[in-house]
Image (cartoon, helix red, strand yellow):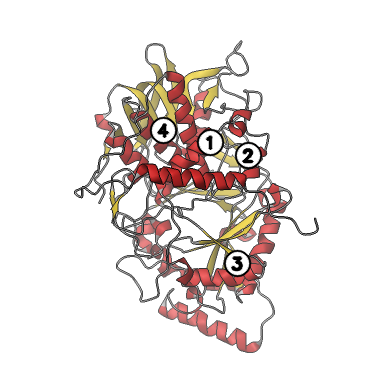
Amino acid sequence: MQARLSMPASKLKAHYDVIVVGSGYGAGVAASRLARCGKKVAVLERGREFLPGDFPEGMAAAAAETQMTGAHGRVGSSTALFDIRSGKDINVLMACGLGGTSLINANVCLLPDSRVFDDTAWPADVRRDRLLAEGFVRARHMLRPEVSPNMASYEKVKALRIAASAFERPLTPIPVHVTYEDGPNAAGVEQAACTECGDCCGGCNIGAKTTVACTYIADAKAFGAEVFTGVRVLSLSKDEQHGWRVWAMPTDADTPRGHKFFVTADIVVLGAGTLGSTEILLRSQSEGTLALSDWLGSRFTSNGDAIALAYNNDVPVNGIGVGNPPKAQVPPVGQAVNALIDLRHTKDVRDGLAMCECALPSAFASALPALLAPGAAVFGEQEERSLGDKLDEMERTTDSLIKGAYQGAVHNTQTFLAIGHDAGNGLMRLDDNDRLELVWMNGPQQRVFQRIEEMLKTASHATGGTYMRNPVSEQVLGGNLMTVHPLGGCTMGESRANGVVNHKGQLFDASRGAAPDAVHEGLYVCDGAVIPCPLGIHPLLTITALAERAMILLARDRGWHMREDAAPVQAVSAAPAQQPEKARERNLAWFARWRRRTPAPVEGE
């Protein structure tokens, strides 16, 4: 079991070699790798630290762990786990806590279509060097994604296989960063084996989920980094003596007045996520403390995300998590996500689509029957059915309403996560109240979402389900799409004329007289904000690989030696780490196969 990693802000020192803002995939990589360079590193996270057993197990606890922020302010605790941001035409769901969104995501470790990196939006250095390959290898070595050995037996996967037959495609197994055996992970932290409870997206109370907190952040701690929670970073400014000032306040403070303080560092790495890093830089720019590219806040993308349901299928789905101890006697649910219908082998990479199933967390189970039954009646779409089928549906719906989510219509409901390539034309800016505002005009009307809806309807009807959009996407409830994969805002470019950071993640300096490719020395962005276009697949592995690449270059530029030895075991067990060289060889071979992959032939060619 993982020991607690964090300290309160009261123990912050005045100066560090490196301050890392955030603790998700990009920030975790930066903290780990720079600590391994022997630097004095501080990690500043706005949320709390969650250990196995701390995550909400019921609807009341889940509601208490939810915060919503929009044009009218925030509702809920500023340190609540589920962090929803409401914007124009788009809502974003992310996590607030040590480990970032890895705490509540589906752990999906998939590569983009290799043609994504042919897009000229990527700087030439990213497209031509081999360091991105090394980044993917390092990411896999730390997160150790694997396909569940029991994947084929899960009912939600069997239902998805029927849906895949409607597209004449096989299912693609998905590797997820979950451990299936007790033992130490790559950071030396003991993890318990997965119990297949399906609660990944509500927070893993078993300790089987290989989050950033128990890998990269734990590794950073093992090599001397100091980790602080409850610290909200506001802005950055230059310090003539110490490099950078990081202005912050306690996360739960109502106002900066009387609470604002700063810590200095030679190097600052922003890894606060697409929204967090962009907001900090926008505020720094508006305060006049930092001259940055005019592209800051632009090229926001939802990564083509869409969430939908197939309600009351003719086959069991068993797609509601049961928790531990289990809330219902049902077959193993599996991990949150296990399989993919891959429709990315298109002539134009931007026409590619992908869709997977997803288990909803048990914390929300009690609310689902009352939410989904009227939702399906009002918003649902299904093919014409016989009177007998309609009576069966009514009976199954009644079963769920009376007996709960683990029987009847809800037990037979499939949740879909779909991904494509949107236009990447969203905008982030600060409103008059100094809050981050998301603007994504006509986002839901983009052609990609119409194509995704057609795909989701086909999948729903294949198993006899009633197709339902995510209820919040209905016009009467706001009409916003929901993304769990926001990208962009601080995108890569060759110079400040077409980007905010360079291929190393260094921020371009827009000061008067500065060269177009001049950078602010010692200031980096290292998260999903730097990705310049939609990836068309779940982005965590790419974000992690780009961060690994950036840290290799940072260490190389400064002549620092990055230790490659195994992390010390950080638990009672003294079991050795798994043969790192053999794992590395496997990962190199795996990446080479992906790089050689060519698109499948398109019908008619």
- The foreground one among 265 and 435 is 265
Within 10 Å of disc 3 (Cα), the crowding (few <14, some 14-19, many 20+) is many
Q: Is residue 363 left or right of residue 452?
A: left
Task: Please name the residue that numbered disc 4 is placed on.
Answer: 30
The residue nearer to you, when weighing 96 against 476, is 96
Residue reaching furthest bottom?
A: 388
**Eye-nearest disc, 2 or 4:** 2
Which numbered dot is residue 117?
Answer: 2
The tag earlier along the polypeptide, 4 or 1, is 4
Disc 3: which residue: 468
Disc 1 marks a residue whose amino acid type is Leu
Residue at 57%, 47% (x, y): give it: 594
Of mark 4 and mark 3, the one earlier in the sequence is 4
Q: Is residue 190 visible?
A: yes
Asked if marks 2 and 3 touch (Cβ < 8 Å), the reply is no
Q: Residue at x 39, y 45 (%)?
A: 582
Q: Is residue 258 left or right of residue 148?
A: left
Q: Residue 412 location in percent, x, y?
A: 51, 75
Secondary structure beneath disc 1?
helix
Q: Earlier in the sequence, mark 2 or mark 3?
A: 2
Counting from the top left corner in percent of width and height, residue 326 is at 33, 70
**Category of crowding for the residue at label 4, using alpha-carbon neighbours closer than 10 angstroms: few (below 14), some (14–19), many (at least 20):** many
Question: Considering only vertical position in the picture, is 214 above or below 397?
Answer: above
First of labels 2, 4 by sequence position: 4
Residue 596 appears at what percent x and percent y? 61, 45
Of tags 3 and 1, the one toward the viewer is 1
Q: Which secondary structure lies at badge 2? A: helix
